[in-house]
Image (spheres, grey):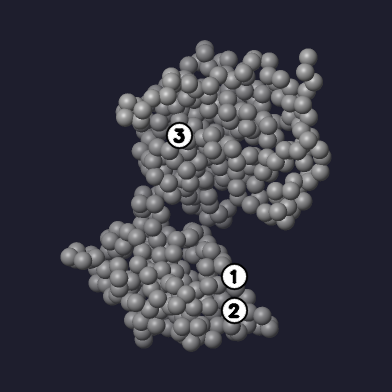
Amino acid sequence: MKPRETVYRCQQCGFASPKPGTCPDCKRTTGELVALVEERLAPPRGGRRVALSQGRPRPLRDVALEATPRRRTGIGELDRVLGGGVVPGSLVLIGGDPGIGKSTLILQAARALAEVAPPVLYVSAEESAAQVKLRADRLGIKADGLLLWAETDLSAVQAELDTVKPEALVIDSIQTVFLPELESAPGSVAQVRECGARLMTLAKGRGIATFLVGHVTKEGALAGPRVLEHLVDTVLYFEGEQHHAYRVLRAVKNRFGSTNEIGVFQMGERGLEEVRNPSGFFLAERPRGVPGSVIVASLEGTRPLLLELQALVAPASFGTARRTVLGADYNRVCLLLAVLEKRAGMPLANQDVFVNVAGGARVIEPGADLGVVMAAASSYLDRPVPSGTVVIGEVGLTGEVRAVTGLLARLKEAAALGFERAVVPAQALPDGVAPPLETRGVSTVHEALEALLG
């Protein structure tokens, strides 16, 4: 009998070594010393995992396309992020911070799927059946087609699928289930990798739509090896601030739809509620006629969002000026402040600058660059940006204002919310198409300052 193989593996990146020590990959990329954990792999008892073979190689022109039916979850924002609904046989991974609402969202989706295509098997590997039942009662979930099972042994779940024959499967969470033939602890690299591969085989082979709930690290990335993200068809991140009611579901990988789509939810007493007008939700409490406040039109996937950017510029109390950024990229904001100082002549080197995206939202696309610049200049000059104006544009290092994608969709969203004017890149004005509101094109930051602040 072949002796069991012992390896030492990094719990963050999956690096394996035959000797103990620290991970060289993590030290090279992050500078951290991560100790390698010993793992002993026993030979599998059930034999080799069956591969998903589809015959012999054939020319691409001979491959027949089959229509892929989608099942609506009844949650419009979730269906939007998934690309129109759940695809049978797909493997969906949902990650997010603890307490953000992952289990609440997946339980509401399981209830909707149980009404459309029962049965749905919900495997709770973290909470007891009574705890999940308490959450279901709070959410008003009483679907007969939803089966609940508190189990951590994935081999037992696999055996039960022959009896239950579910149309959808939920594993909450992938870090707590395990395979008994592996001696490593649940949540280790070997267990997560093998459990993910086993669930992928089950989903594809049986046509079961499978949802996996995953933990995240302190940096916000999915815990476990990166191979888990490569195995699944769709990766969703559930984001939000603990002190704000809104939540954002963001798709970063989707084999059945577009990426970078978002769905907006609001946490209420009856669970997660859809926010069908996110722009109005984020701008509900915006001040008017106040220096340092600018409305920008961001584009998340195919959805335009209007957000309020706030900036506060004040003389530095100490020798080194502070830069504090919430909801935007810190390095990009520092770059834009340097452009504002160099190209517009505003001495910000001795000024503390604080930038915030109101409402706890996030904006990471370059179309909000001009809004950041205008908000900082407005606060420094103590002059408000005219009310009813939205600002759109990317800013380059030479002070030029560059065109952005989806300008017409952004302008339509601003007009629908009652905005009357927009400052946009001059090169991006549509030819032959009348914009839905009054627009003024600018080519440089200096022109934008004259247009908005005089």
The Cα–Cα distance between marks 2 and 3, rounded to whole angstroms, is 46 Å
Seen at 53% across and 28% down, the residue is 200
Name the amino acid, label 1.
Answer: Thr
Foreground disc of the pair 2, 3: 2
Check disc 2: other Cα within 10 Å, few if <14, some if 14-19, many if 20+. some
Q: In which quarter of the image is residue 321?
A: bottom right
Earlier in the chain: of badge 1 and badge 3, it is 3
- Which class describes the residues within 10 Å of circle 3: few (<14), some (14-19), or many (20+)? some
Going 71% across and 20% down the picture, which residue do you hit?
A: 43
Q: Which amino acid does label 2 sit on?
A: Asp
Q: What element carries label 1?
A: strand
Q: Where is residue 8 in the image (x, y as percent from the top left)?
A: 77, 36
Quarter containing the C terminus:
bottom left
Residue 222 placement (x, y as % from top left): 60, 43
Give yes or no for contact between labels 2 and 1 (Cβ–Cβ under 8 Å): yes
Q: Mark 2 points at which residue?
A: 352
Q: Nearer the viewer, residue 122 or 175?
A: 175
Mark 2: which secondary structure?
Answer: strand
- Is tag 2's residue or tag 1's residue first in the polypeptide sequence? 1
Q: Do residues under tags 2 and 3 come within 8 Å of each other at their CB atoms? A: no
Residue carrying label 3 = 109
